[in-house]
Image (spheres, rainbow, N blue to C red):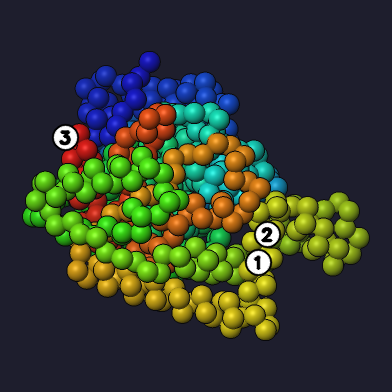
């Protein structure tokens, strides 16, 4: 059996030496997918296609014409379009829908000879933080099958965690890459808003959504970002900013200034072992000569309500297109146009998606727009300005990724307020539009993975990745 690798460079070295092949890698991952089928990480596996591509890429490697991602076997979240393949956003309303085009992210991955082995389960329309709202059932954490993997990109996180693929591409609206990365023990990167094209991503909240990688190493996260990032004429929100060669320069230089938010260490809602871990890293950074200082973020109590007002408003608009008329699920009980809309949407959407559509419609409605939506936009600006003010004085902000480790399946599904508060440390970067990365820094006393998060200035992913590599090396000391 081919071994599991931490980095693509190790895979490619072994391929060159004849120790393995892309075909053998794909066969191993397909075996692992079958073995761990009970985790429910995949909505569909592209087994025969992946093997066919593997044969082609092995030939290209021998010819010396292979792309930079040759040997990389990926999964993608089931809200990323891949031409000729189903894309459902883990929702009944899109069950069986086949995409007629590929997202820019998929095009760029395939152009460099990555193999996409399947599409991963997620919270329905990326709405959830536990991967329990999927029409196809919950995903289970590989570390403890009674616990959630995090969400909404939980299937991607578990696929990487359990060795069912080498890396994965998810989407992050308010923590949907970073939180499952923390719960499953991988590197999870949310780029700056606009760093990666959103063309071909099924939208949840258009001013927040960003695609990004799950990986077992900072090196691979850097390489994947390097491949998928950059301007795109098909997406006006994709920034026309040069993309550095992230993977070519991962050495950090000089001593850094790092802020940690005092509220994260003072809150009773933060797990004691996570607080202990954060203090441990603060001490390690200080001992290594960095300036690490506390700062207060007095807007912390407003980040979750602001995020949910704005994202539900955008979701109510984005999901209007799923109407039972153009494509996707159509109710058999409909008798006319109005009942087609009502019944198709009420039967096709799950409970959490309907809750967020209704909340979003309410905050945008006449009489409430100024009280909720307009006010939330002003608070978002305040949160962004306050975050950027901190980053004018510091290189990075260090905070937990999540206030708790992975929680038991079903524990928070009945109380939306409790569930939404699990996002308290991830939504700050999303509201500010800045890059953030969750780094695996060990397990708690129960053996559950824990993550810490680094935030930095817009489009400063190069510095973030460099320091992240150093940060993980620091954890070994």
The structure residue drawn at horizontal position 39% and vertical position 76%, both measured from the top left corner, is 382
Image: 418 above or below 37 = below
- Circles 2, 1 touching at the beta carbon (< 8 Å): yes
Q: Which residue is mark 3?
A: 477
Tag 1, which secondary structure?
A: helix
The structure residue drawn at horizontal position 44% and vertical position 44%, both measured from the top left corner, is 404
Tag 3, which secondary structure?
A: loop
Image quadrant where one finds the N terminus: top left
Dot 3 or dot 1, earlier in sequence: 1
Image quadrant where one finds the C terminus: top left
The structure residue drawn at horizontal position 18% and vertical position 46%, both measured from the top left corner, is 283
How many neighbours does mark 3 have within 10 angstroms: few (below 14), some (14-19), or many (20 or more)? few
Image: 261 above or below 45 = below
Q: Which residue is mark 1?
A: 359
Dot 2 or dot 3, earlier in sequence: 2
Q: Is residue 246 left or right of residue 368?
A: left
Gap in angstroms between the C-alphas marked 2 and 3: 47 Å
Q: Is residue 50 left or right of residue 399?
A: right
Viewer-closest of 361 and 84: 361
Q: Which residue is mark 2?
A: 355
């Amino acid at each position: 059996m081919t071994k599991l690798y931490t980095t693509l460079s190790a895979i490619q070295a072994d391929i060159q030496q004849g120790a393995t092949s892309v075909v053998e890698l794909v066969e191993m991952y397909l075996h692992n997918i079958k073995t761990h089928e009970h985790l429910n990480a995949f909505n569909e596996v592209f087994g025969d296609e992946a093997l066919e591509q593997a044969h082609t890429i092995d030939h290209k490697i021998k010819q010396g014409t292979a792309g930079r991602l040759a040997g990389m076997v990926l999964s993608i979240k089931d809200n990323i379009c891949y031409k000729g393949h189903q894309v459902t956003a883990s929702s009944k309303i899109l069950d069986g829908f086949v995409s007629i085009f590929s997202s820019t992210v998929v095009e760029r991955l395939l152009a460099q000879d990555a193999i996409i082995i399947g599409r991963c389960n997620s919270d329905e329309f990326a709405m959830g933080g536990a991967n329990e709202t999927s029409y196809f059932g919950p995903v289970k954490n590989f570390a403890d099958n009674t616990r959630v993997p995090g969400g909404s990109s939980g299937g991607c996180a578990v696929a990487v965690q359990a060795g069912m693929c080498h890396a994965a591409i998810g989407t992050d609206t308010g923590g949907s890459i970073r939180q499952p990365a923390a719960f499953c023990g991988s590197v999870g990167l949310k780029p700056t808003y606009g760093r990666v094209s959103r063309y071909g991503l099924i939208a949840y909240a258009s001013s927040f959504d960003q695609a990004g990688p799950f990986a077992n190493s900072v090196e691979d996260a850097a390489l994947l970002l390097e491949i998928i990032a950059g301007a795109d004429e098909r997406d006006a929100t994709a920034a026309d900013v040069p993309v550095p060669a992230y993977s070519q320069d991962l050495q950090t230089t000089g001593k850094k200034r790092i802020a940690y938010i005092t509220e994260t260490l003072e809150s009773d809602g933060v797990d004691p072992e996570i607080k202990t871990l954060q203090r441990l890293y603060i001490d390690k950074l200080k001992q290594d000569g960095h300036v690490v200082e506390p700062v207060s973020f007095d807007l912390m109590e407003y980040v979750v309500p602001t995020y949910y007002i704005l994202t539900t408003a955008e979701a109510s608009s984005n999901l209007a297109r799923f109407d039972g008329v153009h494509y996707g699920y159509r109710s058999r009980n409909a008798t006319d146009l109005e009942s087609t809309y009502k019944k198709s949407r009420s039967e096709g959407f799950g409970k959490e998606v309907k809750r967020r559509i209704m909340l979003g419609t309410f905050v945008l409605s006449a009489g409430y727009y100024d009280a909720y939506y307009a006010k939330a936009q002003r608070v978002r600006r305040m949160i962004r300005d306050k975050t950027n003010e901190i980053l004018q004085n510091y290189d990075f902000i260090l905070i937990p990724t999540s206030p708790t480790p992975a929680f038991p399946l079903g524990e928070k599904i009945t109380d939306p307020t409790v569930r939404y508060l699990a996002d308290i440390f991830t939504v700050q970067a999303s509201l500010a539009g800045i890059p953030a990365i969750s780094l695996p820094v060990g397990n708690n006393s129960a053996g559950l993975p824990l993550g810490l998060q680094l935030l930095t200035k817009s489009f400063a992913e190069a510095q973030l990745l460099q320091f992240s590599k150093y940060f993980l090396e620091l954890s070994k000391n």
